[in-house]
Amino acid sequence: MAISPELPEHTADTSRKDGVAFEILSDHGNAVARHFGLVFQFPPDLVELYRTGFKNDLTVRNGTDNFELPIPATFVIAQDGIIRLAFVNPDYTKRLEPQDIVEALQVMRSPGEVSR
């Protein structure tokens, strides 16, 4: 699953447009991201660039009066609630390799699971 600060109607639009095959949950006001310390507040010049240059007003899409986004992060969480793999990078172009996620899931499924 993924978590997005977008309002549910915008998340649904994004899912349909991009053909997403997994659930996207709405984190209104970045409550979950804020809990994990993963919120990026836009500086004024970047707010203006997004609004006028990119025609993307995050306050409308996210239903808030602030201009912020979560820092991209990936977590693999076991059924016991323990985080088995965490990846956070403020550079949104840097993401965890899918194979790393698959390997973490395989370790969790194997007998004698080992914590990392």
Image (cartoon, rainbow, N blue to C red):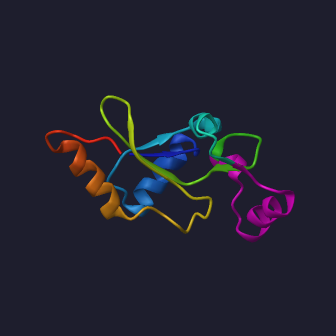
Residue 74 lies left or right of residue 110; in this view the side is right
How far from the left and from the top, in percent, is residue 54?
70, 68
The extreme top residue here reads 80
User: Viewed as shown, does residue 57 lie left or right of 95?
Assistant: right
Q: Residue at x 65, y 37 (%)?
A: 29
Name the quadrant of the N terminus. top left
Q: Main secondary structure of the magenta part?
A: helix
14 left or right of 89 in image: left
Residue at 77% in and 41% down: 65
Please give the name of the residue rendered at 69% of the width and 60% of the height, measured from the top-left corner: 56
Looking at the rendered structure, the number of numbered marks drawn on it comes to: 0
Residue found at the far left of this picture: 111
- In percent of width and height, residue 84 lies at 37, 43
For the point 48% across and 56% down, the residue is 14
Q: Nearer the viewer, residue 97 or 66?
A: 97
Q: Is residue 72 magenta?
A: no
Q: Residue furthest right?
A: 44
* Closer to the camera in the image, 51 or 105: 105
Q: Examine the structure image and report whether residue 49 is included in the region drawn in magenta.
A: yes
Residue 34's place in the image compared with 98, above or below, is: above
Q: Which residues are magenta?
A: 40-61
Q: Quadrant of the C terminus?
A: top left
Who is closer to the viewer here, 24 or 34?
Answer: 34
